[in-house]
Amino acid sequence: MKYPESIANLIESFSRLPGIGPKSASRLAFFVLKMKDLHVERFAKDLLDVKQTTFYCSQCGHITDIDPCMICRDESRDRSQVCVVENITDVFAIEKMGEYKGLYHVLHGSLSPMDGIGVADLKIPELLKRLEDPNIKEVILATNPNIEGESTALYIYSKLKDTDLKVTKMAHGLPVGGDLEYADEVTLSRAFEGRREF
């Protein structure tokens, strides 16, 4: 038996989300059917709002609804440090730790020649331009401990090794092949404390 077209479309839309398979998508679609109209309207409005009112910070690439973002605006942060991460979710993970007080730069991915992702596809050129600021003294490479993350860190290091910048890398303690966003605060804290020069 076929689903009505509107249900089939909703299931297909949920299936496009990461980690949502066909069964989960079906459960979500049928859950939406049981929701009160007011809640469905709010859900739809929230989806539209997030697309229409958020964008990337012009300085660091983090998600924001004001430019520059709250982190870049915060004068109490250490402007001599820039922590380079792959994804927006990594910023939230590090901020949750509550110990790092510097600035960030979000690359929006990692180098992956197999997937056709090169330097121009990431925010690496913007990072290198930003690091010309004489106030910046240290760059912390906090890419994920997997092949793509390590390759990205090595590439950035190769561009900075002949500068006066101190280039550090988070200590191991993060599992190889893991993602920063899934690490607990204690592990992240220790990785920051034990960072070493590249």
Image: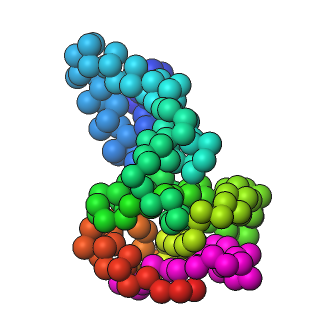
Q: In which quarter of the image is residue 47?
A: top left
Residue 113: x percent and y percent? 73, 70
Residue extent of the magenta highlight: 148-173
Q: Which colour scheme is used?
A: rainbow
Q: Specify the farthest residue to the top.
A: 37
Residue 128: x percent and y percent? 71, 63
Quadrant containing the N terminus in the rendered view: top left
Along the horizontal axis of the image, is 65 left or right of 149? left
Report the residue at 39% width, 52% height from top.
76
Query: Is residue 9 highlighted in magenta?
Result: no
Taking 173 as reference, is 48 above or below it?
Answer: above
Taking 19 as reference, is 66 above or below it?
Answer: above
Report the residue at 34% width, 24% height from top.
43
Query: Is residue 154 highlighted in magenta?
Result: yes
Residue closer to the observer: 68 or 143: 68
Report the residue at 38% width, 40% height from top.
25
Along the horizontal axis of the image, is 93 left or right of 151? left
Residue closer to the observer: 143 or 5: 143
Residue 58: x percent and y percent? 62, 42
Report the residue at 33% width, 45% height from top.
24
